[in-house]
Amino acid sequence: MEIQKGKLSKRKIFDDLSTSRGKSDSIPLDLIPEILKDFPVKTLVRFISVSKPWSSIIRNRDFVKSYLIKSSTRPQSLIFTFKSRRHGKHFFFSSSQHQDGDESSLSSVATYHMTCHSQPYTAITPSVHGLICYGPPSKLMVYNPSTRRSIALPNVDAHRIRMYHYLGYDPIDGDYKMLCMSRGMHARRGRGLAHKIQVLTLGDGSSWRMIENCPPPHSPESPHICIDGVLYYGAYLDLGSRKLTKDHAVMSFDVRSEKFELIRLPPGRATQFTRMIRYNGKVALMLSDRFRSYPGRIEMWVLEDAAKHEWSNQNFVLPHLADRNTMFQVFCAIDDDADEFVLAPETLRAPPFYVFYYDAKKKSMRRVDIEGIIERDIQFWDVDSNRRTISIFPGQVENLMFL
């Protein structure tokens, strides 16, 4: 009954908004933005054509920012990236994050978004407040799964193929910024340091500009994540020796101030991390086993104090899995009170594709089938039997950018 009342209430709002065209006295103008925040992006896209005032409200920078804040409190989605080895393509899908305790539905239907080339070198960023970046250095694109629209970034000097791109978000000003740097070659060490560091603010018509705050000498690496306006990425350090120490540090970049900071890692296995995740609101480095039926293991180092370079260590042992023929990986964590990790098969086999949610508190595992991925009829997709899971990112929210 409560669900029906909610539907009727929203339907009445929709009717009131729809019939208010040309009747500005139907709903006070100052209430319209608050009402509109309750609608999904696909509905707001239709509302843009209602009137110029409505279009102005929905496209307004402050409204876009406030809508993003509110959508962050709603159920979110997972973003999946798969690679076709045969055709050299990346395929993007999304699916709702399964809520713990929702035993009535242990399946989800995937939405296909797009396909892009995976060669010669393609950057794929985690979902950053509803946006993802993809493409080779010379043709970077930023895609909004909510609107299914992309924008092409201005060309950047791509003579060097080893270029790194990181997408960050400043929640105070509501700005998205792309950080780009080249990695040169060093004659003595065979590995170069970051140089020609540039930044681009999305959506304001600006071009790439050189960064003013020079970071400590380092060589950038791909694992990265943006949390509360700070972009973190892995780095090798120049310690003056013959080789750069692998993953010896984490670099942080404040998206608003555009300042870099070096965060040192504890010695040992922490330097071998393979993924960056958000865990209990903090950046965490993760190292996990690839496993079949035997118990896997997750090792994590959670950043407690960046200024003091303090990390805490947490370890989890995963239970046995019944599928003995499939290799699994731990791809991400769901950053809420559930303390859950998402596991998925490395390769795609017979449908349906599925993921496991491991509850670290309950020490339990549940399977959720994701329908509409393996069986999808897409060019270059359904004819390739050699497809690999590249990434799974949580926290995809609805965003009004690029309407």
Image (cartoon, rainbow, N blue to C red):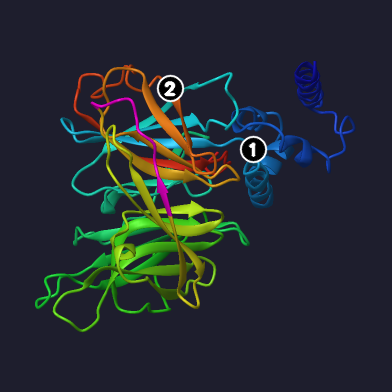
Q: Which residue is mark 2?
A: 369
Left or right of 36? Residue 196 is left
Q: Quadrant of residue 92?
A: top left
| Residue for point 15% across, 30% down | 86
The residue furthest right is: 25
Callout 1: 10 Å neighbours few (<14), some, many (20+)?
few
| Disc with the residue nearer the chain's start (1 vs 2) | 1
Spatial CA distance of label 1 from label 2 is 22 Å
Q: Which mark is residue 74?
A: 1
Is 143 colored magenta in this rendering? no
Left or right of 117? Residue 356 is right
Residue 317, how many percent across, how many down?
39, 45
Dot 2 amino acid type: Asp
Q: Quadrant of residue 167?
A: bottom left
The residue furthest bottom is: 240
Instruction: Look at the image and tell me whether residue 164 can be seen.
Output: yes
Q: At numbered mark 1, what does the secondary structure look like: helix, strand or loop?
A: loop
Is 322 colored magenta in this rendering? yes
Which mark lies nearer to you, 1 or 2? 2
User: In the image, which residues are magenta?
Assistant: 315-325
In this view of the protein, which residue sits in the foreground, 273 or 191? 273
